Image (cartoon, rainbow, N blue to C red):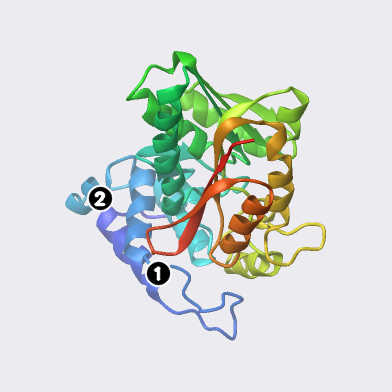
Amino acid sequence: MVKKTIGQLRQEGIAFLTKRTDEGKSSIPSGVVSTTPVLDVDCILSFVANVSRSYVLSHPEYELSNLQCEFFLKSIKQRKKGFPVAYIIGKKEFYGRNFFVTPDVLIPKADTELLVEHSLLLAKEILLTKNSLRVADVCTGSGCIAISFAKELEKQIALTNVEIVATDISEKALSISKKNAKNLNCSIRFFQGDLLEPLIEKGYKFNLLLTNPPYVPALVAKELLKDGRSEPFLALNGDCEGTIDGTGVISRMISQFSCVLEKNSYVLIEAGEYNISKVATLLSEYGFVEVRIFSDLAQMPRLVQAKWCN
């Protein structure tokens, strides 16, 4: 392969991602996977050349090696099939930090930062009346919620009286979250198990519980994955035991809350616009009070907050 410059590869990559595929010969629904071809190409080039995105734009004459050119072209072909840029380059920014990601975990989404923001507000409220804070992040995945919460709280208070634990049913997901915690110098205890079961077994009690659980209806999740995004179905599918609205996993988790929550504690649950009202109703039925729903960046209902007073 002939060596090429950043400018040449950038032009070729954008053209390739922009060109429509012959739908008669492709399994890709629209023929064009990326809605942000320029951004995708720039991110991949930045990763391949190990330079900043601003360098990619300002140094089109920079020549890449044969291996770098081959990797770029392979990556662009993967992106054309729907494979996310985050998985291609192995990282995704969340709350101002880069998190290592693979197809074993969901890619952190900007809307989930809402959960971190509200958890920090609740943490400060709890610490006004208590001298310690115990936090659980259930279905942690990449660990982006627990780690971001810890690092942001650390900016404001000493973490000597703060304990943070995280759980996930997937051993592969936990290996990624542990790697992220180590990379970001964050002290979190991780447990493998189904929802709250490992915490119940150990007799843990918390005054703040955070979770971004699987909440997408199974049929919707299957449709989403047809675009080649390759995110784990297990982390998306919220249905179980006969449910069809994506609330099965959340419902099971809510039934376990009383076993691990202290009096006057809080829970924050991310859910989808198709079932978030039912999640709020379920919390009320289980005895939670001050149930509130918050919207995400697109003004869609995304987060449920509730207080446990029993």
Q: Give the labeled residue for mark 2.
A: 56
Above or below: residue 37 compared with residue 200: below
Residue furthest left as drawn: 58
In the rendered structure, find residue 128 and report the number of the disc placed on it. none
Q: Quadrant of residue 13?
A: bottom left
The front one of 143 and 210 is 210
- Outermost residue, right side: 241
Name the image quarter holding residue 308.
top right
Q: Residues within 10 Å of mark 1 (few under 14, many from 20)?
A: few
Secondary structure under tag 2 reads: helix
In the rendering, at what x and y percent does residue 185 appear? 45, 21
For residue 187, side relative to residue 285 (left or right): left
Q: What is the spatial separation of the Cα atoms under label 2 and label 1, in whole angstroms? A: 20 Å
The residue most toward the bottom is 24
The residue closer to the viewer here, 137 or 186, is 137
- Report the front residue among 1 and 26: 26
Q: Residue at x 27, y 43 (%)?
A: 52
Percent of width and height locating residue 173: 63, 39
Q: Quadrant of the N terminus?
A: bottom left
Looking at numbered disc 1 in the image, what kind of residue is underneath it? Thr
Q: Nearer the viewer, residue 195 or 175?
A: 195
| 216 shown above or below 123 | below
Pointer 2 with pointer 1, Cβ within 8 A: no
Residue 59 left/right relative to 260: left
Residue at 45% of width from left, 60% of height from top?
A: 76
- Decide if residue 60 is in sight here: no
Residue on which the image places disc 1: 35
Residue type of the residue flagged with mark 2: Val
Q: In the rendered view, does 295 fall on the left or right side of 266?
A: left
Kindly identify the residue that appears in the image at 73 percent across and 40 percent down: 256
Say what secondary structure mark 1 lies in.
loop
